[in-house]
Amino acid sequence: MWRDAGSCVSRRMTWAVAIVAAFACATGRAAGTPAVLVPVRLPITGTRDTQVEAAVLRQLDRLTADPARRGVLVLEFTAAGDDAVTASDFGRSLELARFLSGERLAGVKTVAFLPEGASGHAVLAALACEEIVMPADATLGPAGVAETTIDDAVRAAYAQIANRRRTIPPAVAVALVDPAARVVRVATESGERFAAAADVPQIRESVAVIGVEALEPVPLELTGRRGRELGFVRLLAGTVDELARGLDLPPEALAADPSRDGGWRPALATLDGAITADAVSRVRSRLDQAVADGANLLILRIDSAGGTPEQSLVLASWLAALDPERVRSVAWVPREARGDAALVAAACDEIVMQPDAVLGGEGAATLGDRQAESVAAAWKAGVARPRGRTWSLPLALALPGIVVHHAAQPASGRREWLCPEELAARPDHDAWQLGAPLGTAPLRLAARGAEEIGIATHVVDGLDGLRKAYGIDAAVALPQPGWAEELLAALASPGLAWLLLLIGGAGLYVELKTPGFGFGGFVAMVAFIVYFWSQYLHGTSGWLEVMLFLAGLVCVAAEILVLPGFGVLGLGGGLLVIAALVLASQSFVLPTNQYQIRQMQWSLTGILGAILGVAAVAALLRRWLPATPVLRHVLLEPPALPTELDDDADLMGAEGMTTTRLSPFGKALVAGAIRDVTTDGRLVEPGTPVQVAEVRGGRITVRPVGP
């Protein structure tokens, strides 16, 4: 008895060990199974079949390297337009189907992934795969929609490919292409089969038939849900991630990898400052040229707080339209990608951030409710849908009012970040559970937080860290932006912008202290031209700021030189100059969020620092410049004359001589001292005899003596 009991225990342990071993083998096989995704662009015309064959053959060694693990080849059927779905050529589709079902791929598991379904003769290529995966609402067929007549050769070809793979019964395959064919599901005492309706009497003669069900509609087309019920569709999935999980593969196993053929060929473009039409055009031109030159890794360096959401969407849609099999796009955020700039980053295939970088949050643009709705609709149609991505988290980085939750599907273990609206639109919404919200939109994510929730792929230290993350050899040159782009970025940096203002202010001071238009005026003109030009190219300055600045200078000059009065023109002109400089350093007029308030504070602080710097430089110039041997004629030193000042009231009628030009302000030697004087508006040259005509409030007014 004990021996029997021991045998029983031993057998149970053996079965347990076998089950564990089998599970371990299955897990290891799933984790290490080589898998490749190859896109099949519809329609299948021209040389498209040979292109797909060449792409598959390049990966064949990798898929068959381990005899113990059968590689998985996923063919993703995607259409370039509505007409492309039905316009596939029969001959080319048949050649591709024969290749996919032939002996060369006998050691590979082939999967037809139809995210948008398939019709026309592309159906024939899908039938040549061992498994079919498609969304529940997508349709397969009809295959003969573009044909006026279906001949025996076409019917025979569909039956032949179906017989090779047995993914779909031959009778069903023929019904998909021939609108005149009728197919039924026959339940018999020995099982279930699919056959042409005309063959049912013959079946009855050989076996007892329990029931007959005609497959509809006519011509036959099958939704993913119906195909799954009939056993033709292996899995219901609409995205690559869902497909990978359904095949027990890690999500990265089916990620497009353009580096497989020859490694990475990188290119770098920069998007700094405000996002404008000019900035987007420069980036697109740079990346277009890089792709034309053979680059397969586009690195977009983003350091921006946004600016124009519509232009950000233009660039985001362009990035989403890139072929992931040929090109991978990476957003590199060294400092910040706020507001609508976060949408540009999220449109790339991957996001890489530096440790102190920020993704999302309030930016340079404030969106109203209607504009936010337009941005959301454009993102869903132009980025999320073409790439099969969720839209909740990317939009929550830039738009207010979107509450993103941690959603879980207990049955499959899937995790997503979804808002209630997106979850409600999913056909399987009942299988999901919403958890706690992520935060208040617009979301502002630090680098580590973005990495934890999966929106950032890597957190790196500088360009060297980026190279290491993508395995870019140091010997591989990383094409940099041209000198013009680097010069633009340098000129628009805050430090250099305030330095230009400092130089311009010092030049104006020197010009006011010297007769005529000279060195100071030239330096000031060049400095301010470069400042406004760099800010214009940076997207924050336009003609309005330039006109305000010039109007302010004219008012100040009029107050000093032409129309001396109570200071209204001078004060107003000074405010116009300050307003022009502030507006030129930011992309908004009045702040409406916390980021914009901080940006305006920074602009005002920079301008105040420039003013204080000009005052310090003026003091130094006044003290040291006249004494330098080379530049002493730029700022003349006043004559060393007595400076004891008498009571101004005693100067009425006193005579003297101008030592500088009065226009109308200047200096004159009156009563043995150099004094600040003015005229009644006339210009008086140096060395002209003058007489004090009026003394009021410390202002001494003189007039020329003589004819």
Image (spheres, rainbow, N blue to C red):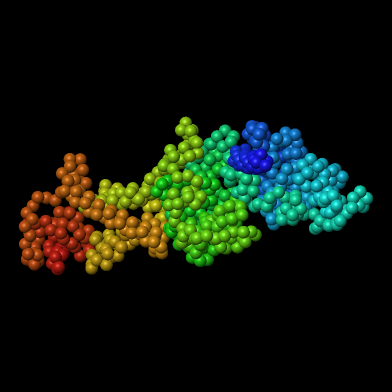
In the rendered structure, the answer to whether residue 476 lies left or right of residue 195 reads left
In the rendered structure, the answer to whether residue 677 lies left or right of residue 286 reads left
The residue positioned 61% from the left and 54% from the top of the image is 411
The residue positioned 14% from the left and 51% from the top of the image is 638
Picture layout, residue 610 above or below residue 593: above
Can residue 456 be seen in the rendering of this structure?
Answer: yes
Q: How many marks?
A: 0
Can residue 345 be seen in the rendering of this structure?
Answer: no
Q: Quadrant of residue 486?
A: top left
Tell which of 71 and 517 is nearer to you: 71
Instruction: Quarter of the image for the C terminus: give it.
Output: bottom left
Tell which of 28 and 475 is nearer to you: 28
Q: Position of residue 290 (x, y in %)?
A: 53, 40
The residue positioned 16% from the left and 61% from the top of the image is 677
Q: Quadrant of residue 647?
A: bottom left
Q: Position of residue 278 (x, y in %)?
A: 48, 51
Q: Position of residue 189 (x, y in %)?
A: 85, 52
Tell which of 1 and 31 is nearer to you: 1
Instruction: Quarter of the image for the N terminus: give it.
Output: top right
Picture layout, residue 10 above or below residue 402: above
In the rendered structure, the answer to whether residue 667 lies left or right of residue 283 reads left
Q: Position of residue 98 (x, y in %)?
A: 76, 38
The residue positioned 55% from the left and 39% from the top of the image is 296
